[in-house]
Image: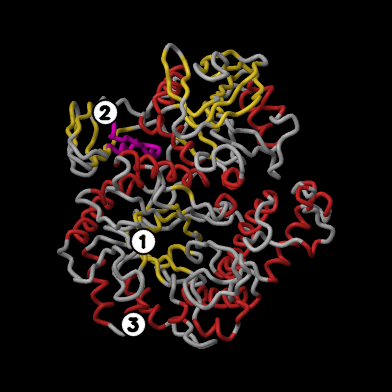
Amino acid sequence: MSQTKRNLKAPFLLHGGDYNPDQWLKYPDVLKEDIELMKLAHTNTFSVGIFAWSALEPEEGVYNFEWLDKIFDDIHSFGGKVILATPSGARPAWMSRKYPDVLRVNAERVKQLHGGRHNHCFSSPTYLDKTQTINRKLAERYGDHPALLLWHISNEYGGDCHCERCQAAFREWLKERYDGNLEALNDAWWGPFWSHTFTEWEQVESPSPNGEDGVHGLRLDWRRFVTDQTVRFMENELVPIREITPDIPVTTNFMADTPDLIPFRGLDYNRFADKIDVISWDAYPTWHNDWETTAELAMKVGFIDDLYRTMKNQPFLLMENTPSMVNWHPVNKAKRPGMHILASMQMLAHGSDSILYFQWRKSRGSTEKFHGAVVDHDRSPGNRVFREVAELGKKMEKLAALKGTHRTAEVALLYDWENDWALQDAQGYGLDSKQYIQTMHAHYRPFWKRDIPVDVIMKDHDFSQYKLLVVPMLYMMEDRTAAKLESFVKNGGKLVMTYISGVVNEHDLVHKGSWHEKLAEVFGIQPSETDTLYPRDCNKVFYEGKHYELKDYATVLDLAGATTKGVYEEDFYAGTPAVTKHAYGKGIAYYIGGRLEDTFQEDFYGQLLAAERILPPVGITKPDGVSIQVRCNTKSVFVFVMNFNEEEKDIQLDQVYEDVLDGGSLSGVLRLHPYEVKVLRVDK
């Protein structure tokens, strides 16, 4: 796949979203009204064609593009841009009936009926051919249209197929992974356990609740295969697009699981990063929920923003969000006045070059008729939601210079999808308390609260550019990652690792000697056992003159050169090391042996940041719940000051700033209303 650099050719930040004119073809007055409302809403970019296959090809080989021609021309008429989607996310009914091989088979080995979306077989030769054909038609017709900005490949890829074709593809994938050596596969999957040794490749099947679902190596490889199979399916879609429109960038929209707002677990998104030109994601936080503060939820949003931004080390796109509410949360609460603008500005602050919505206009029927939209059923530009969208659009027009700007970080957190899969499967520790993503949040939070920029990186990224690298709960660690960590510390980096790290290799097999020997060398310790606590249990750790509560996990450590910085206070391991420090080469490795309260992370990282002189980009003094994030170009620093509190808060500016949104200059004490945002500028 070509790695040609393809940039978004738009002079503005993108504002608009998913537009489904194919639902309104019988209502030309509505389509005409849409164009006028788009201008009133200060929107400029629209994603079209996402689920439009039946409108584009109502019968096999019979195409209807005239309606889409008009949409392109109408949007172009006011200077707007089009993100053109390939329609593979939901195929037409005629195809399912005529070509049943396109239908998926679920893990119970039951063939699915037509319906829903993303229920296609990734191995179906029919579907591979049909998607290429329709994509070629679209590229040939619209590739030279001046409104075409970006290709939107399918929509929210996900799911798997267990049909015989996919089983055969899985076996071929395994043969390639294990060099055709069945004995190597059996070794990797620990085949003798429960007599699960395979003697022929044809005996291998995907995991199923009706059959084998407990071989961890099998489950891990199946998830890897599904990711690779999905990537290959996407690459098949890209063939005519890259051929006909080589200069138009492509994206596919990533997801986050709610209500916890964690990275989507079904696919390893890092495997997509070098195949697409722009990272985009769909964000639906549960704002105003009753289990966490607004600031806490904003922190989780920031974590995923930093994860997706760092994948390509460039601005990302917010491809979908709602201007009001969704229709699929357990409780679908409307955004309060001001929240939409605040949440949008946070996206821009963390690196997005767009605010795009699902959806532009509410559907009249089916499952999304009550999902939030810019245009409600009343079709009025005077309602609250429309007015807030228009207000945001005006603000974004004043922020055009932000487009393409980036941010640098001296701190990185290491996140790994495969590690998450393996840790979910681990039948040990606490089945409900492993909480990998929540642990990532616990170690991200102290930096977010201090406004310290963070990159959330993958194990294949370059570690050397950071001063501080934090590695929470990297349960699965291959030799290559351990070697990179060793090199990072040896060359002067500061590394923090936690309990339940380095336990198994890439096949989910426990390392010989129970811990990776390279880690023992770097950290100067040897974990001897991990104590798992019941929810009501607790211990304490004494660190730097203070007592901290410990829950869930405590690793008993034997010193092998490290210095004890904190000790357990209770249980049979009272008085033994809980937090250690080890000088290695030019750097230092810290190990945190237990799950400690947030106050510990606040104090521990506060001391580390001070020691390493890692400072916020600006010196503004602010209270909790106010977040400050920056983006820079060669001339300017843009400072986003965001109040994620339900009450007014005062901040103290450290210098004179230009007020980008309201004009004039600001200095001294600044009072922020609830949910208020200020965007400040200063020369770099």
Three-letter amino acid code at disc 2?
Lys
- The answer to which of marks 3 and 1 sits earlier in the sequence is 3
Relative to residue 8, is residue 418 drawn left or right?
A: right
Cα separation, mark 3 vs mark 2, equals 52 Å
- In the picture of the structure, the residue carrying the numbered disc 2 is 622
Three-letter amino acid code at disc 1?
Trp
Residue 149, given in percent of the width and then of the height, sits at: 43, 63
Residue 64, given in percent of the width and then of the height, sits at: 44, 85
Q: Which residues are drawn in magenta?
A: 621-641
Q: Quadrant of residue 267?
A: bottom right
* Most common secondary structure along the magenta stretch: strand
Of residue 110 and residue 275, the one placed in the foreground of this image is: 110
Q: How is the image coloured?
A: secondary structure
- In the picture of the structure, the residue carrying the numbered disc 3 is 25
- In the picture of the structure, the residue carrying the numbered disc 1 is 328
- Mark 3, secondary structure of its residue: loop
- The answer to which of marks 3 and 2 sits earlier in the sequence is 3
